[in-house]
Amino acid sequence: MSHVLVVILDDLKRMPDLIEAWHAIGVPGVTILESVGGYRASTWLRRVGLGALDRLFEAEEVRRRTLLVAIEEDELLERAIAEADRVMGGFDRPNSGVLLALPVVQSRGLRKVQRQEREQELPPAVWPGWAVRRHTPIKVVNEILALEPTIVRPQTSLETVARAMMEHCNVHVVCVVDDHERLIGLIGLRRLADDLFFHIMPEEFMSEITDLERALEYANKSRMRTAADAMQEPVWVKPEETVKDAFKRMHENRLSGLPVVDDLYHVVGYINLLELMAVCTEYGDETSEAGEGEP
C-alpha cells in the first residue's frame, strides 16, 4: 500500500537538510506548502489585531512549512521517517514539528525515470597498489576485530558511561541512543575524560579561561552530569559504505572510531582506525616488494 508522509515543520532552518537527506535515499519529489498553526495564528492575531491578516504569512512566529511525500515501498517509508527523525533531532523536541504517515488507497505517477548521477572520479593514490583498499565495504572491515559497540542512554550518568567504556577497552567512542534505539549522539574518550576530570581537578581547567568563550565552556562543564550533557552530534558509517567514507568522517570529526548503523540508524557494529589500517596494509608487503625493483 502507498502512503503519504506528512511533515509539518516548525524549525524551518532544518528543512534543507531534511530534503537533502530524503533525496539521498531515493524519496520521490517533495511538495512544500506554506502553512500556519491555528493556535499560534489566533494568539498572534489577538495580540496584533485583525488588521494584520494580510501580513499573517510574513510573521516569523507563526510561519510553518508542510512537506508532503507520496511513497510506495514500506521500507523506503521507514527510512524516510528515520531520516526525518534524525534531522529534526526527534519530533518530541519542542518547536520541532509533527510527522504523520497516512495510507493511500490508489496512486498514479509515483514512478518517474530518475536522472543518472555521474560517477565521481577519484584522484590516484600516492601508493597506487593500495588504491583499491579505499573501496573496501565497511561490512568487510567490521569483521576484522568484530568490536562490540558501547551503547548508553541519554540519562546515563557520566560515571556509568566511563565504566561501560572500560568494559570495552578497544572502543573509544560511546554511542548514545534514544528509546527507539536510534543513534542520537557520540561521546569520545577524550571528551569523556575532560568532563570527568573537571569535577576531580577543576583547577587544571581554570588556567585555560582567557576570554568570555572559555568562561562559558567552563560553566557548561560544571553542569555536565549525563550522557546527554556531554554527547556531540552523531556521526556514523553504514555497512555498504567504504573505508574512504569511514576515514573521512573520523578525520573530520577527530574521532578514533565510528558506530556502524543500519538504514533506521540502529547501531549494529563499531569500527576503529586500527581496523582501517589493517585493511589498507593487508597487501603492504606485496606492494613494497613490487616497488623495490622499480627505478
Image (spheres, rainbow, N blue to C red):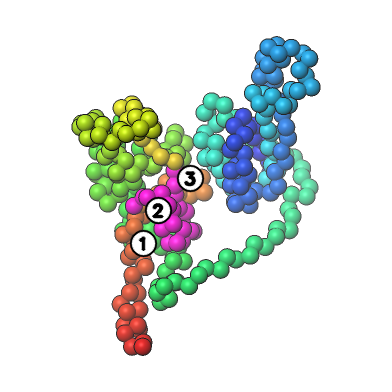
| Figure quadrant of residue 91 | top right
Q: Quadrant of the N terminus?
A: top right
What label does residue 265 carry, if any? 3
The residue tagged with tag 3: helix, strand or loop? Answer: loop
Instruction: Tell me, yes or no, if residue 270 can be seen here.
Output: no
Precedes in sequence: disc 1 or disc 2: 2
Q: Nearer the viewer, residue 83 or 109?
A: 83
Q: Which residue is mark 1?
A: 276
Instruction: State which mark lies toward you, 3 or 2.
Output: 2
**Do the numbered discs 1 and 2 sit on residues whose CB atoms are within 8 Å?**
yes
Give residue 130's position: percent from left, percent from top: 40, 73
Residues in magenta, as a range: 234-256
What label does residue 119 carry, if any? none
Q: Is residue 168 above or below residue 284?
A: above
What label does residue 250 carry, if any? 2
- Identify the residue at horizontal 40%, vertical 53% (top origin): 250
Instruction: State which mark lies toward you, 1 or 2.
Output: 2
- Identify the residue at horizontal 24%, vertical 44% (top origin): 167
Badge 2: how crowded within 10 Å, few (<14), some, or many (20+)?
A: some
- Identify the residue at horizontal 41%, vertical 58% (top origin): 247
